[in-house]
Image (tube, grey):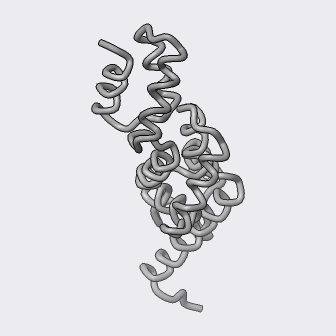
Amino acid sequence: MNVMELAAKRLASGRRTEKELYDHLLKKGADPREAAAAVASFREDGYLNDEFYCRDYFRIALEKGWGKQRAFRELENRGVRRDVIEEAWETYAEENPVSETDNAYRVIAKMAGTEDLDESGRLPDKLKAKLARRLYGYGYGTAVIYAAVDLLAEELYKERAAETGPEEE
């Protein structure tokens, strides 16, 4: 099989970044110059486009609850240049307004309920730390983590107040 056929076969099985395709061709024994030429040819023909790949990746990552930082890191691990990722993010965020705090809140909202509040209606520090660790692992920054945890604590406090009714004096 020649290099162009190898590349076509690889792309037929799913979208790839330019680097992923290039690395695959080298792994299959292609000459580096031929691999680079194949990547360039498929890019010029529109079958490879790292910016489009990034935008699709952002959609999938956000559906999984991942934060921007994790999506960026994963794309960099796939060999996409940082400037391409940033440009793709700007386009994606412009077309699909993204609230990282809302996304982070959705991730942790399933992890706590009103029964987790202490006697004074606050989230215990141990639970806050657990929620923060989860969000950090999902790729959220510190400011977003604090905002999401605070939002959850506030929502749970309101929910408990609605459940118990007004306190008697």
* Residue at the image point whose x is 47% and y is 43% from the top: 49
Please identify the quarter of the rendering in which residue 80 is found: top right
Q: Is residue 76 above or below residue 135?
A: above
Horizontal relation, residue 38 to residue 8: left or right: right
Estimate the x, y position of residue 5 in percent, counting from the top left: 31, 21
* Residue at the image point whose x is 48% and y is 14% from the top: 26
Q: Residue furthest bottom?
A: 169
Confirm whether residue 103 shows in the render.
yes
Horizontal relation, residue 100 to residue 165: left or right: right
Viewport quadrant of the C terminus: bottom right
Q: Nearer the viewer, residue 115 or 14?
A: 14
Estimate the x, y position of residue 37 in percent, counting from the top left: 49, 25
Q: Is residue 28 above or below residue 41?
A: above
Please identify the quarter of the rendering in which residue 143 is found: bottom right
Q: Nearer the viewer, residue 131 or 2?
A: 2
Estimate the x, y position of residue 60 in percent, counting from the top left: 41, 50
